Image (spheres, grey):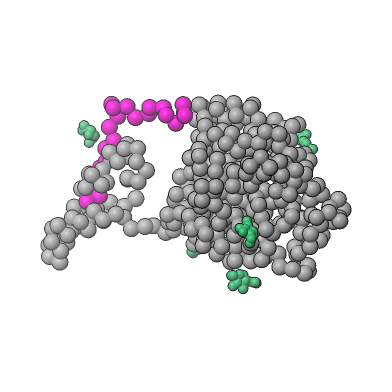
Amino acid sequence: MPSRARDSPGRQWAILLIGTLSWLAAAVLAQAPPSTYLRTPSWRQLDWQRLELYAFIHFGHNTFTDEEWGRSQSTPDVFSPTALDTDQWAKTFADAGMAGMILTAKHHDGMALWETNTTTYQIGSGAWARDRVEQGLDADLARMAAASAKKHGLRFGIYLSPWDIHRDAALPKAHLAGTPNDEPQIFGDDSPGDYNAFYAQQLTELVSMRLDDGSAVELSGSDTVQTFNWTLFRDIIREYQPNAVMWGHQGVDARWVGNEDGWTVATNWHSINRTQDDERYSEGELQTGVRGGTYWTPAEADARLRDGWFYHANETSKTADALLEMYLSWVGRSVNLLLDVPPDTTGQIPAADVDIFLDFRAQRDAFLNRELLTSSIAVNASSIRGGNSALYGPSNVLDGDGDTY
Ligand SMILES: *[C@@H]1O[C@H](CO)[C@@H](O)[C@H](O)[C@H]1NC(C)=O
Ligand SMILES: *[C@@H]1O[C@H](CO)[C@@H](O)[C@H](O)[C@H]1NC(C)=O
Ligand SMILES: *[C@@H]1O[C@H](CO)[C@@H](O)[C@H](O)[C@H]1NC(C)=O
Ligand SMILES: *[C@@H]1O[C@H](CO)[C@@H](O)[C@H](O)[C@H]1NC(C)=O
Ligand SMILES: *[C@@H]1O[C@H](CO)[C@@H](O)[C@H](O)[C@H]1NC(C)=O
């Protein structure tokens, strides 16, 4: 808030008396927007902050093997959705009032959901994809999801797991031995080969992906955590997707909130004092942030609709009431919420979950659309910056415009 002393009429008169400025110039000076205080968001971060709520999609081999962390032991044929419909995902999220969706393009098991030149371990090598291609249909799940997001007005993002069990010699893959998916083990500093270059190529393929109509895929959230050559990966994302927000333990653009369970402390600062290259903050430290910190790195919370990230038939979903509570206590505390919503083995969001989201949306709209400010309520100010009611008057509080104040 601007300080009253600076805006007082006395200050303007003093300037006039000194005669260094004309009355007009003094008035303009007095009306200039307040200078920024400590750290402020980049336009990219501000744009992202307004998204508030978006979906995380974990779908792949683990969906079909009923695992959370598959060990890269099954061939691409295991990926066999019976009625895959990425439009149904996007419509469900748009109807739920979400602003976007982030697809896990590769989880720790190394299975690539897009057409890649980096590995045979991709869904494109399996029977499901071959059938689709024979029918003249797309079998690149990342591109399909991106196209559906665009169709339903959602932002799109990707998560590409840095850890890749498929390439990690520390985890033997007996079931793949001798198959075309038995590939060189390049993960780890003791392994021959350059995993950083491999990951960089995967990342480049994804961030430079084009839709069938030739348009570029626009990434908003590029959920990438990296402990390897961070500089290289950050540069690739910035080059191809300058608008993308990178999320990690403590940056680049947004940080982890410190837990995955749906809560945050009442006061959560948007700034911290470390970058992703520095020593890691503890979970407790991430929950509070650093007051007056060096970097603007707001928190993003990741949570799950069900117990796991991938779909398991034995698990139940949170209720619409629980989702509303989560929304109010996270987004309400200006922490963006990334909610995991897993498709089942058909390749769709289960109907019961769609109903939960419609209920959540109705409850949220009813809550947010309450008419609190009736015409009988007047907003007054004891002092207005530079006396300029149009720019700084109290009516700006009620105009429904987030850019006025
Ligand atoms: C559901 O099944 C998965 C996979 O088998 C298992 O990891 C998880 O613990 C089970 N969850 C519950 C709540 O039983
Ligand atoms: C794979 O390589 C081929 C031939 O160089 C190229 O046309 C294609 O675009 C590449 N695919 C990807 C996903 O980069
Ligand atoms: C990481 O990538 C950057 C940018 O390409 C490069 O300059 C640097 O040498 C790489 N670091 C290592 C350790 O390879
Ligand atoms: C954070 O950095 C600022 C300087 O930018 C310093 O004044 C402050 O003491 C630091 N706070 C913590 C908790 O490290
Ligand atoms: C507050 O604003 C209203 C509407 O502009 C006006 O009628 C009223 O007199 C003001 N009250 C005070 C105390 O200034």
Q: Is residue 50 magenta?
A: no
Q: Is residue 302 left or right of residue 119?
A: left
Q: What is the quadrant of residue 22 in the picture?
A: bottom left
Q: Is residue 371 magenta?
A: yes
Question: Is residue 90 visible from the viewing direction of this image?
Answer: yes
Q: Is residue 353 above or below residue 160?
A: above
Of 228 and 140, which appears nearest the observer?
140
Residue 269 in percent (x, y) is at 50, 51
Of 383 and 334, which appears nearest the observer?
334
Q: Is residue 383 left or right of residue 283?
A: left
Residue 239 in percent (x, y) is at 51, 62
Q: Is residue 188 above or below residue 346?
A: below
Q: What is the quadrant of residue 224 in the picture?
A: bottom right
Residue 207 in percent (x, y) is at 56, 56
Q: Is residue 391 above or below residue 200?
A: above
Q: Residue at x 38, y 27 (%)?
A: 371
Of 331 and 311, which appears nearest the observer?
311
Q: Residue at x 31, y 37 (%)?
A: 399
User: Ligand 1, what quadrant?
Assistant: top right
Q: What is the quadrant of residue 339 in the picture?
A: top right
